[in-house]
Amino acid sequence: MAAEHLLRIEIVCVTPGEQVLIPLEVPSGTTAGEAVERSRILRRFPELDPAGLELGVFGRVVPAATVLGDGDRVEIYRPLFADPKQARRRRAAGKV
């Protein structure tokens, strides 16, 4: 029986108060969504809705069904509460 090929990946989640990076080994063919589940990172961030997660790989938004490659970094994006462009405009206008 051949040994299963494992990929080395990372799962990353950043909140205003915390940054978490979890190195993980997963079987070849694992999707971004499956990797997040395997990492158990959402236990640390119960405020995130697993069904509505937006994921990325190296800064590019991808569907949860995206099959990962060796060395990929899966990023969990949290919802924005303010439009960054509008916030910048308010700060520039002195209306923080």
Image: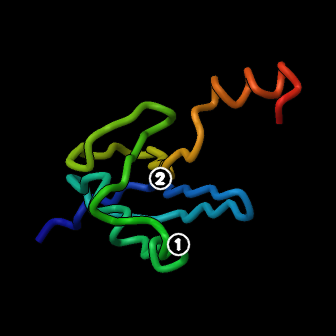
Left or right position of 96 against 57: right
Residue wearing tag 2:
76
Report x, y in % for residue 64: 26, 49
At 63% from the left edge and 23% from the top edge, which residue is drawn? Answer: 85
Left or right position of 69 against 17: left
At 38% from the left edge and 47% from the top edge, which residue is drawn? Answer: 54
Q: Quadrant of the C terminus?
A: top right
At 45% from the left edge and 49% from the top edge, which residue is drawn? Answer: 74
Q: Which mark is residue 91?
A: none
Separation (CA) of disc 2 from disc 1: 11 Å
Q: Are marks 2 and 1 in contact (CB under 8 Å)?
A: yes
Say above or below: 49 vs 89.
below
Q: Which mark is residue 45?
A: 1
Report x, y in % for residue 16: 71, 57
Q: Amino acid at mark 2?
A: Ile
Q: Earlier in the sequence, mark 2 or mark 1?
A: 1
Q: Residue furthest right?
A: 94
Q: Residue furthest front?
A: 95
At 39% from the left edge and 35% from the top edge, which residue is drawn? Answer: 61
Report x, y in % for residue 75: 49, 48
